[in-house]
Image: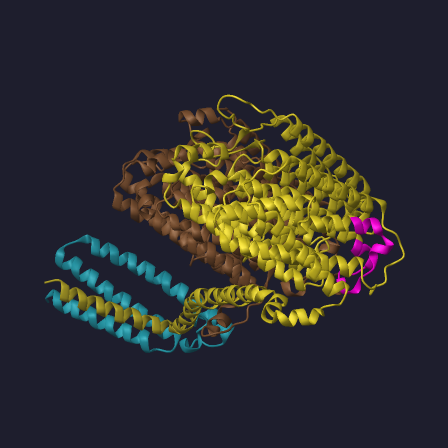
Amino acid sequence: MPLTAYLILAALVFAIGLFGVLTRRNAVGILLGIELMLNAVNINLVAFARFRADIGGLVFTMLTIAITVAEVAVGLAIVIAIFRVRRTIEADHLDLLRG
Amino acid sequence: MSRFPVLSVITWMPFIGAVLIMFVARRRPLAVRIIATVTTAISTVLSLGVYVAYDREAALQGTNFQFYEKLSLVPPLGINYELGIDGISLLMVLLTSIIIFAGVFASWTVASRSQEFYALLLALVTGVYGVFVSLDLFVFFLFYELAVLPMYLLIGIWGSSGEVRPRGLFAWAFRETGVGSKEYAAMKLTLYLLFGSAFILVGIFALYVSAGTASFSFLDFEGAALDPSLQRWVFLAFYIGFGILAGIWPLHTWSPDGHASAPTAVSMLHAGVLMKLGAYGVVRLGMGLLPEGAADLAWLVGGVACINVVYGALSAMAQVDLKYVIAYSSVSHMGLVMLGAATLTEAGLNGSVFQMFAHGVMTGLFFALVGLVYEKAHSREIGKMGGFGRVMPGVATAFTVGGLSSLGLPATSGFVAEILTFMGAWRSAYSWWLVPAVAGTFLTAVYVLRVTKQIFWGPPSPHFHHLEDARGTEWVAIVILVSVLVLFGVAPGIALGPVDTATVPLLSRIVEP
Amino acid sequence: MHVGSPALALLVLGLPAASFLLIGVIAPLRRSGRAAAALSVAAIGGALAAAVTMWQSARLPLDGPPPNPSATWSWIPGDGGPMATVGVMVDDLALPMCVLVTFISFLVQVYSYAYLHDEPRPSLGRYYAYQSLFAFSMLGLVLAPGFLQMFVFWELVGVCSYLLIGFWYDRPSAARAAVKAFWITKLGDLGFVAGIVMLWAATGTFDFWTLYGLADSGVLAAVPNLTTIMFLIYLGAVGKSAQFPLHVWLPDAMEGPTPVSALIHAATMVTAGVYMVARAFPLFALTPDVLRLICWIGAFTALLAATMACVETDIKRVLAYSTVSQLGYMMAASGAGDYHASFGHLLTHGVFKALLFLGAGVVIHVFHTNDMFRMGGLFARRPWTGVAFLVGTLALAGIPPFPGFFSKEAILAAVLNGGFRLPFLMLAVTSLLTAFYMFRAVFLVFFGRAHGHAEGHGVPLAMDGVCRLLAAVTVVYGVTLALGGHHGEAPGWLPWVSMLLAAAGIALAWATYQRDIIAPSRLAAALGPIDFMARRRYGLDIVYAGLYRIVLLGLSRTIGWIDRYVVDGVLNVFSAAALRAGDTLRRLQTGQPQDYVYGVAFGVLLLLVWAHLVSP
């Protein structure tokens, strides 16, 4: 399979993730969208590493996975904390920073 | 030249006082005042000592900057802690020490948060001293900001609000910005002065880059040959930047609001010394470093100064609030200061420096007295006062002396400054400057005597029978300032001797580049 | 030329200065009143003695070039020699003037002690502090060796005048008069200061002696704008010596205590302008145009003031207008080129006008009013006061052998010899009017029916004694002048004409106010328009009030308004606009993370498009 196919897949996954982030009202859904976007990046990195025989891409991917885990952990923790206080995780209602 | 770092001690003594007040004298008002008095007194005594020890002969030989100190701060950038004093800054340091010493006594009655008040006041004074004595422009700028910034808190917290009725086309803007309140005044003053600082900083960096001296030292810049067109631009930047602080028209409107809202000692210090900082900056950096730029733009400086003189006096006449009258008179007098400098003549520049001193003392006296009157009568509105001469004869006498000095009465410092400015104006390239300068003294006579008559003369008003004359510590500031005003008016040579050693070389670089 | 001792001159100056400093600084001394008075009187007495000694001991070098009569010290230092000096100049002008000033000051200070005995003690102390300051300042002016020092003391006497007119500062009228006097004289001083600064710029010096030398050598004549310069300097004299159109302050200045009027507003300070013109005469001599103007203005002032004196009912104001009128005489003589005549009249006038004012003080003390129409018949009750006042009146009216006759004679001769016909006529008419209004006062106050009722209590000895002494001095002075003979080329008919005019004035006053042969109202009707205008002071007060209220205050209100609502207004508009803009723009911050992500996504898209367009 040519590199293009991987890239198109990654682009599709990224687009789906972005769509999720932009449209979901539930904070958990938004987090899931972000995960998809990160994984799209991972696909790109792995694909490039494979086709250009560069180990750096793999290393980066491992790093990204680690960070993603941490991010999900913190993100979910925040979501739970918000839920405890506000009794909701609907993103529309969380606008404390409105000007 | 002495080994003892006397200029550093003068400069940092108030700062030490501020630190001591914050950490040692918590909630002990008397201790606060004692520390403030002692530290400022040390500075005052030392600056008197420096004044006496200043070697005029050496200055005439070319050793202009005496009591020199140097300490390397950031060697790669050429930033040094470099201090020195010449005839002009000598007088300014003396002025600062007199005003702050009097100011400490004038704010003896500050009741709320007095230790913060004194700490900020003293920190500010360190900034002022630093500006006058530092020879490194980077350090100069740091001190300059230190002198400007505490003002915001001092006015915003301890100030008093007046009333300005929103009227006319822009009434909505007046309502929206809260014109007349102390918060408005503090914000306006700070924004204006920081706006000016930006110009100054740009000017200093432009000098640093173009002179290629790899040092911020004033003495190095003095030797650098700068391109005339660059000189013009940098001079303009300095003129606007420092000019804002000196209250040049039409960028002066921060000063009446600020001075009117500020507490007594702050008004004294601000109108008495800080505005001089602006004029000093124009003379020292503008004229001292950019001779050709100064010569090219003297018409602008002098022309605007003429507007200042007449416009400030007429505005003062129109005011109904006593503090505004004094504040506008500062605008008018700062016009004379700038005018004297713009004449580029020996008499004019000497007059300008002397006017800085004279006006500093005079306006300090005014604000001290107005503070007293306000404290006792709880009113600043001239129309409501009357007949105070009967109940407070001492204050009335001092106010009259200050007023007469401000209209240029001989035997007070104001006269010497004015006559020298006139002499310079007629000898300058634009002799018509004499006309607004002379007209300004008449207008000053009109508003000063009108106010004096309204407040102190006439039948005593029944509302004010309870008033008392100044007492105890309140006398200290008044007596000091009045004596200085008269002493330097009778014997101007005391001040003009050293000043002349600094102004003549400065001018010789401008007139014969 | 006589040259006096500088050391003595410094003593003359120093005594009143020391007295002022002591009274001013030592509060208990000031509050005690009496001690302050004693100190001040002692100081001025010492100064009088020193001045007389200085006059008597003045040298008269016979051969060689005239010596420099001034001793100066540096005052304002400058590069290459002082820019301005202070010192003393003791010459023929300063010597007699010093004696006059100290003599009148001394008498007035003695007189004041009795006159002001009802004042609270601190006020009395304040009064004597001012008096000492005035004596010092006036002497400093007289002894000034240069224009700058003269201006310094010129302003200081102005301030003393301001403070003393406003001595009773509780009275609104006194406060107004004091301020008015200061402003109007200051108006003239603006010209003075501008003139001396211009002269300095042209010659590099303020010193009279150097300037005389430059005038002699012709250097000064080559100065451009010399006429303008001398005109400006003359303006100072216009204000100080109450010349038209700046004379309006002097009548109002009568709000001050009467001894002050005698000293400052009659005998000494107001003559400073005349003294200055005499002092700078070698300079004025180079500008004939200015001299002509001085002469015309002087004569016109003399006539104008005399007409106003004729309709005044306040005794002090009559004397004030007569002072203005006499100052006009002096100025006219200076303008005509004979400053000796002018100076001579200055001296005689100083003596007899002080006498008249101090006499008027006694009269006011007795009647408790200033209105002459509520007085009368005082001669019978206080003949000695009457005689003293009469001596002064005869001197002022110009009757020989009183000193006014001779000095006025010299002035008329000078003006006539100078070729000023119309001014001479004006002065001659003034001479008649002077006799008329002074005798009108005498008849109303001392003779005629007693309209007013004099208070019972007597006049303090000090006041009476001073009046008698001054009357005696006036007579002796006149006799001395008469014996000294004339020194002028007046035509032979002049003395007779002037005596005739004076006699006519006296007769008219007698007929109108003593004998009722002519009703005053008919006399007024006969001179309709002049009477109408004179009563309204020729509308000058209204003009000044209008200028002040409408022009000056109007302008200041406009500027004040512009400053607050336009200059500052524009700034506030900026500031308010910034506040509003912030208020609007903050709505962009919705607080919805997804909105921000939309922004990011859109931004990335834009960057991509841009990168695509830019890169080939």
Quarter of the image for the C terminus of chain C: give it.
bottom left
- The image quarter in which residue C569 lies: bottom left
Residue drawn at the location 57% of the way across and 54% of the way down:
C427
Residue drawn at the location 80% of the way across and 57% of the way down:
C446
Question: Quick check: can you spot residue A12?
Answer: yes
The location of residue C432, given as percent across then percent down, is 63, 57
- The image quarter in which residue C129 lies: top right
The location of residue C242, given as percent across then percent down, is 58, 53
Q: Residue furthest right?
A: C456
Query: What range is drawn magenta here?
Result: C363-387
Residue drawn at the location 41% of the way across and 78% of the way down:
A92
Residue drawn at the location 42% of the way across and 59% of the way down:
B250
Above or below, B377 against B212 in this view is below
Colour cyan, chain: A
Foreground residue, A90 or C98?
A: C98
- Which color was chain C given? yellow
Q: Main secondary structure of the magenta part?
A: helix
Left or right: residue C573 compared with residue B386: left
Q: Is residue C367 magenta?
A: yes
- The image quarter in which residue C90 lies: top right
The location of residue C42, given as percent across then percent down, is 76, 35
Foreground residue, A12 or B76?
A: B76
Foreground residue, B461 or B144?
A: B461
